[in-house]
Amino acid sequence: MISQGSEIRAKDGRAPDVFSRDGWVAMRQYREAEEVDVAVIGTGAGGGVVAAKLAEAGLSVVAFDAGAFYRPLADFASDEREQDKLYWTDDRISGGDDAIEMGSNNSGRAIGGSTVHFQMVALRFRPEWFQARSRLGYGRDWPVDWREMWRCYDEVEDALKIAGPVTYPWGPKRGRYPYRQHELNASAQVLARGAEAMGVDWSPCPISTVSAPRGKSPPCVYRGFCKIGCSTNAKQSILNTYIPRALAAGAEVRDLAMVGRIETGSDGRATGVHYHRDGEWRFQKARRVVVAGYSIETPRLLLNSSSPSHPQGLANAEGLVGTELMVHSNHAVWGVMEDEIRWYKGPPSMAVCEHWNYDDDKDFHGGYAFMSQGPLPTDFATSMVKNLGVFGMELRRRMALYNHMAGLKIVGEVMPTPANRVELSEETDALGLPLPRITFRFGENDRKLSDHALRFMRTMHEAAGARDIFETAGSAHLMGGCRMGFSAADGVVDGAGRAFSCPNLWIADGSVMPTGGGVNPSITIMANATRIAGHMIGAIARGEG
Amino acid sequence: MTSFAPPRERSPLAGAATALALAGLVGAGLWAARRPQPRPQPGSALPVETARQPAARRARQGGMLLAASAAIDGATEHYRGGFHRWEMYLGPAASIGALAASAMQAAMPRPLREGLLLTAAGVGLAGHAFHARNILDRPGGVCWSNLFYAAPIGAPGSVALAGLAGLAATMLERREPEMPHRRGRWIAIGTVAGLLGTTAEVALLHFRGAYHNPAMYIPVTLPPIAALTLGAAAARPSPTRLRLAHRMLGATAMMGLVGTAFHAWGVHRNMGGWRNWQQNLLVAPPLPAPPGFTGVALVGLAAIDLLEASE
């Protein structure tokens, strides 16, 4: 029977062995009254990395996650609806002119976070993006040296054994990816043919699924269910890389544990976290707190943690928490190919074109990457219903062409705008926590970017031989909401991830990203979390943390 | 339930198997090297004549191994490709022909044998052209993606080598008053080319596998060393050089057999392991490929026999 993710598994001194169908590994446990060195909230791309790094540095760590602790081999079905259990689909109030649809494209609710169902695309930021304001004239600068990020990318890529191309056409020279590129599926070859016809570079996409055995991970068998959770463990997610490391290093992971509030003392320092688990509210004492709940839940938690010393919400002295929320525009062109493509085979995005991330001769700020596509049937049908309004026989006719379809979809940079934000609403959820209210609208530059992308991809798709081309619009990923800044007036946290107005609080997820870049954010979040963990360990060793 | 040990990149069983295989390899190499070499005794038959027959036998055995390896590997890979072009039957068929010609030395008329072996050599060479076209037809042309995953450019070489090794054996079967060292040299040159070509193919494919197991470096280091020693021995034969080349070729031959065990381990490391053999025999490291090295090395040993006899 497939688990519905409702049973607490990490308890009684053991946690699920993610490489088995029903096995366990030992897990150290801490008493709630014991003041642990660090409480980490969230176990995804940010929190999972931080928990492992801190535990490996010898700190006592308890990591909390609202989601369940799955064993992919036993718990993941090849069924799109069953796997909806991996998304964060709690009630949220999403509004604005371009209200963000919350769910599969931008959230995760499991140990390992959204990396359990991410598309595995592992693209680095362009170095100039870390100084987008001063070097490219838009957005914000990161209080971070790109070379430091580059070293952290190296570390994360090795931890995930990223399978990437031997030579990458864009950006500064980089070391060799730990594993070799995968064989391109037919969908990726469409992009390659189109790029060659247009005279722009293309590349096999560096992705986080192994192309050769690694430990207990077999090489990818190209089932194509990556986006709803890999059931073979070939995908290198936080769940089967950093979480086992964290457990082995002595961290405790508490699954199905929703943190609702961070407690602060009269001196303004965080003292522990209130969390809901097994039907009751509980409290864990901690010397330090790292928040990694992503761009909606991190601001929500901070805003809900107001206290006499933090009357506007934790770390919100300047009112910046929740502001400058970003997504990626996720527009796409689709077309019918003469040949059978069977785009569901293999990881969905096996070829990439980053031309417009590195070419600055364009009429808009920011950039975009686009990748070949391979949506599963329900996903694709849903997208056609929403974007084209087709239904009945027309939908059936179009779905009959499924095996001949190919598509190109962008990850487009969206400008940070104060009005795009997360706030608390008056309504509360079943646990009594205020629901987040999300407001979003694409700006003028964002529309110029997606128009440019659609024009370019349509031409390329035609050049590759596609006919009956149509377009869809959408968004994916979340960034910002608790950005890093150079000063308290400029950001919620500093370049080391530490809150300006709460010295023992860190944020280490995608919410700290000051700009979104034109690439999928997961590996950047992991690299940044690696960096933040390094600074934390250094500060603690110096007695400054 | 495991303890607080850090997660392992490799299983202890894999480590043990690797160590065992390496120990076996080294042991077998030493054993082969210790075996006394047959030295022509004074007053015995013509030394050249005593060397000719074992040399012919070795070359024939090498050719048989190469042909069997090429036939099974080619048939498996082309089956995986659905035999979607009729030309894809030619490689395995020619290999089977070469295998029959080498195996049925006594039962088959010489012209037929030579015809089959020549055909294999020709089909192998043509195979390179077919595989090259497959690479060039794909987007990207000559690029890593296509070298890794399109038709493997080096693979048809094993069919050609099977044919050439068989032809060398038929040549040695003839009693001709030709100088043995000249024949030995030619066969040595062919062996060196075969070893280096096979190594190049292995290097490419093991690079594709990111050398995830350190043992994957062995077949890209040992054979070139063997080729080097054989080349040196053929250029200026001396007892020391010949002995060294003999040892290295012996080790290479053993390595080819042990390689199949490693590849069997590789099958186990794919999704479903050996239980899922129907799929994994197609996608995992090819079981029949490593003995190709054994085949080439045996031909090299034939060359050594001839060179020693002419010393």
Image: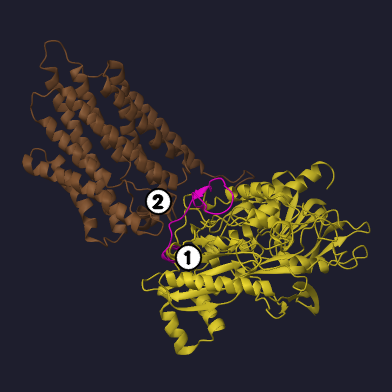
Chain colours: A yellow, B brown
Could you say which is closer to the camera, residue B238 or residue A455?
A455
**Residue at the spot x=23%, y=36% of the render?**
B62
Mark 1 neighbour density, 10 Å: few (under 14) some (14–19) many (20 or more): many
- Highlighted magenta segment, given as a residue range: A164-192
Q: Is B145 rendered above or below residue A6? A: above
Q: CA distance from mark 1 to mark 2?
A: 21 Å
Question: Residue B57 location in percent, x, y?
Answer: 17, 31
Q: Nearer the viewer, mark 1 or mark 2?
A: 2
Question: Residue A193 location in percent, x, y?
Answer: 42, 64
Mark 2 neighbour density, 10 Å: few (under 14) some (14–19) many (20 or more): many
Q: Is B224 rendered above or below residue A478? A: above
**Residue at the spot x=11%, y=17% of the render?**
B46
Q: Which residue is mark 2?
A: B148
**Chain letter for mark 1:** A
**Residue at the spot x=62%, y=44% of the render?**
B6
Check the image and name the residue furthest to the top: B42
**Residue at the spot x=15%, y=43% of the render?**
B117
Is A26 positioned to the left or the right of B27 in the image?
Answer: right
Circle 2: residue type? Phe
> Which image quarter: residue B253?
top left
Circle 1: residue type? Gly
> Which image quarter: residue A256?
bottom right
Q: Which residue is mark 1?
A: A224
Is B88 positioned to the left or the right of B43 in the image?
Answer: right
Check the image and name the residue furthest to the bottom: A392
Residue A304 located within the stretch drawn in magenta: no
Question: Residue A68 location in percent, x, y?
Answer: 64, 64
